[in-house]
Image (cartoon, grey):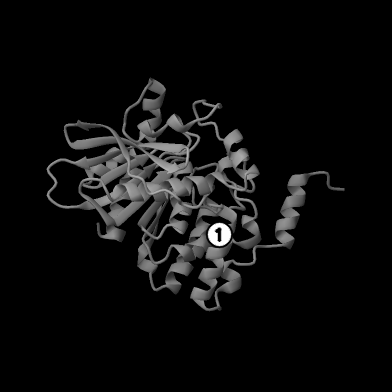
Amino acid sequence: MNNSPFTLHEILLKNNPPVLTFEKNKDRDLYEWREEVRKAFAEVIRKPEKTLSSPAIIEYEKEHEDYHEIRFQFESEPSYFVPGHYLYPKNLTHKVPVIICLQGHSPGMHISLGRFRSEEEEKDNQGDRNFALQAVERGFAALIIEQRNFGECSGPENFRRGGCHIPAMQAILLGRTTIGERALDVSRAIDIAADMPFADTDRIGIMGNSGGGTATYYASCTEDRIKALMPSCAFCTVEDSIFSISHCQCNFMPGMLKYFEMADLAVLLAPRPLVVVYGKKDNIFPEHGVLKAYEVAKEIYKKFGAEDKIRLVPGDEGHRFYEYPSWDVFREVTGW
């Protein structure tokens, strides 16, 4: 006799598998399937409609040894402002690709800037989390925004690793998801990039680790202006990660597993360059789930004749970013 809801849900998933998976639809017209996936994904991510186009509010500009910095805020939706920073290398004479950098569960976006507020935060950067500085060092511009529920955008649960529980549940009660709200912020950030110095908005990339990698992947599924993506420690089968292992509430989209797995959404990404970074010892996005998902995504890319645009970058440790060789692979696949 089963008394476990967990076991019941496993049985339900086994008996009612997703209906729009690549495996079930690979012999159909590719573009017809893609449109069905796009419509179903819009239903589950529940991204708020973009209603604003107002420019960024510049708070200050600062010169550093190797780069310029612009601090700004923008209104993402009525009554909600997103703070951010834009960095671009000194001595530019031409436009360069812009990389949107997203921190995951962390004290905030200042980690991307390498501005640590404690010894503990500095220790955390052993996971190569100063994304913006890495991007600028390689000649890119970096656009850093604070993700909802983290850092400067934390709510009443403002604790070190981000207070997602209450706002994530509020979003669901309102017919939204946190993932959808974060995707909206990314879309508005791309609007803002158009007004920034030396920004090549035909070459917008996005990357992030953990919760930042999750937003990287799903925002790219909704936003065609993103031309390349590098999610880290986030891409995996949902069944082997979010469904089976304790994760933050911000990861959940109601009804997703009625339709597809994470890898199936690659049909919304191909043929854009996709670099999947993962840690072999990651205990919340396990390697077997990553490899399983990657094989599906690779098959989808092959359908588009774009098998050379998807790459897998393993790291020997756990849940962290791997600066080397991830950026080298990103440059190789994108040609940027």
Query: Whole-percent x and y of residue 148?
Result: 48, 38
| Residue beneath disc 1 | 41
Q: 205 or 187: nearer the eye?
A: 187
Q: Is residue 135 rendered to the left or right of residue 77?
A: left
Query: Whole-percent x and y of residue 48?
Result: 52, 50
What count of labels does the image hold?
Answer: 1
- The correct choice, above or below, for 30 with respect to 280 in the image is below
Q: Is residue 16 rendered to the left or right of residue 53?
A: right
Question: In this rendering, does residue 243 appear at all?
Answer: yes
Query: Whole-percent x and y of residue 258?
Result: 66, 60
Q: Quadrant of the C terminus?
A: bottom left
Q: Is residue 14 rendered to the left or right of residue 160?
A: right
- The correct choice, above or below, for 204 with respect to 209 in the image is below
Query: Whole-percent x and y of residue 125?
Result: 37, 32
Q: 170 or 34: nearer the eye?
A: 170
For mark 1, does the 10 Å Cα neighbourhood hold few (<14), some (14 to 19), or many (20 or more) residues? many
Q: Which residue is drawn at the image coordinates 61% and 71% (left, top)?
A: 24
Q: Which residue is drawn at the image coordinates 27% and 38% (left, top)?
A: 133
Q: 103 or 326: nearer the eye?
A: 103
Residue at the top extreme, as displayed: 118
Where is residue 85, by image quadrant? top left
Question: In this rendering, does residue 247 appear at all?
Answer: no
- The correct choice, above or below, for 276 with respect to 117 in the image is below
Q: Is residue 257 rendered to the left or right of residue 55?
A: right
Q: Amino acid at mark 1?
A: Phe
Where is residue 256, by image quadrant? bottom right
Q: Secondary structure at mark 1?
A: helix
Q: Which residue is drawn at the image coordinates 54% and 47% (left, top)?
A: 286
Q: Which residue is drawn at the image coordinates 59% and 58% (left, top)?
A: 43
